[in-house]
């Protein structure tokens, strides 16, 4: 949890906006440090977290979260965290064995044209079953609203899933988690090309990014500095609130620069990096 | 092959090897490993971080490395570090058979694995499926899995995969613009990543990126790996005759740096690396800074003739201080010349050293920067210097301004000399 980012987003473990769909995106950069922030924030806020870790192992997130002060192993034991380790599950699909013990979530690897229905079913069934259980609390702990974290969506495109299927998946997740259950969804989407480039074949990840931007209520877009590589400032984050209140859409944008440390990240207004001043 | 260095290092460190190739027999590749130089000579630390060290990662999770090459003649690498990781190799000799046979090698030679009759269970090609299956068998059999019991001593498996994505593996990524199986390689890399994360192994993969036209595909391949390095040879390109590059054989780009189990990755200090292939060695260095400096300086001096108009200088000075002034015709002409001039000026590293040199050469010069010029700065440049002949004799102070944003907001950095 990065304290400066919390003050920027006006969210603390005790109070944060519910029903939000947060899109974390990057262009030629790496925004995964923000995923760690949201993971530790929501775990500290005592929410139940469903994490689809499709690109890294559980140990990676565990090691980083340890430095941010949250123990993932403990959260998993208590039942607060449900972690889908995409890499591990995928092996049982990609290398067929006689006994297939994995969950059905990564079945889309078999035939990506079918879409992400199996992945969504995994999310829906585990999220709804737990919220049903909470109502008849038999001494179980009181958890906050459900939160779904996905890291990351662009790898699904690399694995052959179509952009439409990924957008459908995110839409269904939003409908289930945000609207029905008043929870939050955080998804990471990565992009590689330059923004101004206009390819005839609208590249998959660009389309995905555009589609997701329309669906979400808050975007954090990470980019490198426009003037190039700098050791002390790792890049810039553009935060955009897309409120959908009754009074119409109201988008507010702010740009910050950031530097990632071993134990967190610091955010500052442009030009006020400690290395510069 | 840089792959050969990786495997040679494995032999010397007594790791186990797994070599897969579609065209060259793995045995041939193994026979051509470079010979290690066994006397310990300390070589100065090159800028490139030695990813091919023999030390395993602190955590037992494994890394995946991807190397790409482009129009590259056969090179061997001899990366070294001052902390004595790694060994040095003599490219002109091959490794002794006794040393080589001491290491256990597993091979995967594609022609030996005929295509099976059963259909693949995913979008991967037969060849990649077979390779993945064979890798998993070796990892399981030899006990490289992280989850395996800790009874016997653990070793590291070094996996070298040669020329994935090429036609030799049955993949048409390199032939067509719209390949029929565009996700075969990426699915395989995903499976490989899964295998590596759950075992004590490191993989180096070479991909002929000069044959793959789709940039988005290269982007997804890079993101699926932990480390990515691209080598671009000068052979056959216009840079071969460029005097700036005459000492080097090619450029080395670090596309991706790993950050496993940590939030921040160690970014390389210098991003401007070039390599050269000597008779016995392959070295990587920071691109020649000195030559750039003098060429730039000469060019800048040629441009100075347009800068002596006094009103132009005044306007520039006040602009540098941040005041808004009316644009004058004369100024816009000089500014456009300044735009051309700035393109050649200094790179971001060791700029302090250059500043000192510059003031030694050009006394009675005041250095100003023009904020407008930051629009269109090429990527590598974080400081720009502008030289103007100064009427004041003793006032040779210099300001250096760093502009980090091209549009309205500029941040300024003052670095005292």
Image (spheres, coloured by chain):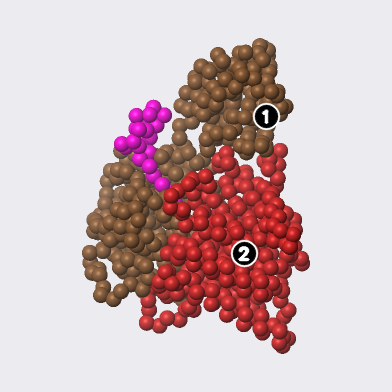
Chain colours: A red, B brown
Which element type, helix, strand or loop, lies under badge 2? strand
Residue A146 seen in render:
no
Which element type, helix, strand or loop, lies under badge 1? loop
Left or right placement of residue A58 versus residue A5 in this view: left
Where in the figure is residue B76, as x and y percent of width and height? Answer: 33, 46
Q: Is residue B19 magenta?
A: no
Where in the figure is residue A262, as x and y percent of width and height? Answer: 62, 55
Where in the figure is residue B175, as x and y percent of width and height? Answer: 29, 53
Camera-nearest label, 2 or 1: 2
Front in this rendered view, residue A160 or A73: A160
Residue sitting at 47 percent across and 44 percent down?
B48
Residue A122 seen in render:
yes
Residue A186 image label? 2
Report the magenta residues as a range: B228-250
Q: Is residue B285 above or below residue B389?
A: below
Please check whether the numbered discs 2 and 1 fall on a single chain. no
Q: Is residue B406 above or below residue A31?
A: above
Residue sitting at 42 percent across and 64 percent down?
A160
Residue B416 image label? 1
Residue sitting at 51 percent across and 65 percent down?
A166
Label 1 neighbour load within 10 Å: few <14, some 14-19, many 20+: few
Label 2 neighbour load within 10 Å: few <14, some 14-19, many 20+: many
Using the numbered discs, state the Cα–Cα distance from disc 2 to disc 1 in whole angstroms.
44 Å
Front in this rendered view, residue B308 or B35: B308
Left or right placement of residue B248 versus residue A156 in this view: left
Q: How many marks?
A: 2
Which quarter of the figure has residue A250?
bottom right
Q: Is residue B237 magenta?
A: yes
Output the chain of dot 1: B
Q: Residue furthest front?
A: A247
């Amino acid at each position: 949890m990065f304290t400066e980012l919390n003050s920027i987003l006006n969210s603390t473990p005790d109070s944060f906006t519910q029903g939000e769909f947060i899109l974390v995106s990057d262009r030629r950069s790496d925004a995964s440090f923000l995923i760690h922030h949201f993971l530790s924030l929501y775990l500290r806020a005592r929410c139940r977290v469903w994490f689809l870790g499709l690109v890294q192992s559980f140990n990676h997130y565990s090691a980083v979260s340890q430095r941010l002060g949250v123990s993932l192993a403990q959260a998993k034991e208590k039942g607060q965290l449900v972690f889908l380790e995409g890499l591990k599950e995928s092996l049982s699909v990609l290398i067929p064995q006689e006994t297939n013990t994995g969950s059905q979530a990564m079945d889309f690897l078999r035939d990506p044209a079918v879409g992400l229905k199996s992945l969504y079913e995994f999310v829906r069934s585990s999220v709804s079953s737990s919220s049903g259980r909470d109502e008849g609390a038999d001494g179980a702990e009181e958890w906050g609203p459900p939160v779904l974290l996905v890291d990351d969506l662009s790898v699904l495109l690399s694995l052959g899933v179509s952009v439409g299927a990924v957008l459908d998946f995110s839409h269904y997740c939003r409908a289930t988690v945000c609207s029905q259950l008043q929870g939050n969804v955080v998804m990471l989407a990565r992009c590689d090309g330059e923004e101004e480039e206009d390819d005839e074949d609208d590249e998959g990840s660009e389309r995905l990014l555009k589609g997701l931007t329309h669906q979400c209520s808050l975007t954090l877009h990470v980019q490198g500095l426009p003037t190039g590589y700098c050791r002390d400032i790792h890049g810039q984050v553009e935060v955009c609130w897309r409120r959908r209140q009754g009074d119409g859409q109201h988008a507010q944008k702010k740009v910050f620069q950031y530097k990632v440390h071993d134990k967190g990240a610091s955010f500052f207004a442009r030009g006020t990096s400690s290395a510069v001043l | 092959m840089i792959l050969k260095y990786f495997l040679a290092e494995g032999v010397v460190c007594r790791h186990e090897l797994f070599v897969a190739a579609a065209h060259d027999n793995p045995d041939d590749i193994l026979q051509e490993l470079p010979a290690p130089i066994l006397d310990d000579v300390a070589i100065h630390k090159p800028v490139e971080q030695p990813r091919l060290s023999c030390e395993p990662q602190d955590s037992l999770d494994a890394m995946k490395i991807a190397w790409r090459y482009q129009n590259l003649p056969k090179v061997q690498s001899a990366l070294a570090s001052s902390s004595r990781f790694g060994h040095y190799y003599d490219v002109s000799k091959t490794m002794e058979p006794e040393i080589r046979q001491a290491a256990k090698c597993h091979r995967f030679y594609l022609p030996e694995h005929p295509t099976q009759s059963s259909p693949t269970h995913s979008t991967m090609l037969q060849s990649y499926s077979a390779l993945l299956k064979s890798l998993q068998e070796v990892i399981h059999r030899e006990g490289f899995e992280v989850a395996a019991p800790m009874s016997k001593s653990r070793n590291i498996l070094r996996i070298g995969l040669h020329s994935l994505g090429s036609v030799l593996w049955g993949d048409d990524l390199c032939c067509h613009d719209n390949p029929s199986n565009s996700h075969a390689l990426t699915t395989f890399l995903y499976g490989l990543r899964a295998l590596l994360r759950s075992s004590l192994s490191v993989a180096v993969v070479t991909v002929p990126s000069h044959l793959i036209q789709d940039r988005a595909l290269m982007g997804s391949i890079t993101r699926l790996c932990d480390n990515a390095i691209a080598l671009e040879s000068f052979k056959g390109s216009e840079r071969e005759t460029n005097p700036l590059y005459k000492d080097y054989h090619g450029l080395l780009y670090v596309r991706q740096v790993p950050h496993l189990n940590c939030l921040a990755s160690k970014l390389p200090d210098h991003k401007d690396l070039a390599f050269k292939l000597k008779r016995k060695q392959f070295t990587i260095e920071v691109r020649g800074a000195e030559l750039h400096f003098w060429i730039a300086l000469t060019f800048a001096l040629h441009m100075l003739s347009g800068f002596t108009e006094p009103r132009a200088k005044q306007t520039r000075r006040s602009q540098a201080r941040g005041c808004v002034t009316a644009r004058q015709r004369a100024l816009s002409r000089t500014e456009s010349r300044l735009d051309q001039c700035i393109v050649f000026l200094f790179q971001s590293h060791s700029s302090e050293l250059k500043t000192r040199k510059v003031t030694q050469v050009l006394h009675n010069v005041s250095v100003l920067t023009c904020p407008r010029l930051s629009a269109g700065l090429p990527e590598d440049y974080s400081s720009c210097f502008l030289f103007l002949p100064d009427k004041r004799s003793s006032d040779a102070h210099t300001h250096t301004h760093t502009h980090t944003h091209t549009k309205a907001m500029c941040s300024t950095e003052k670095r005292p000399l």
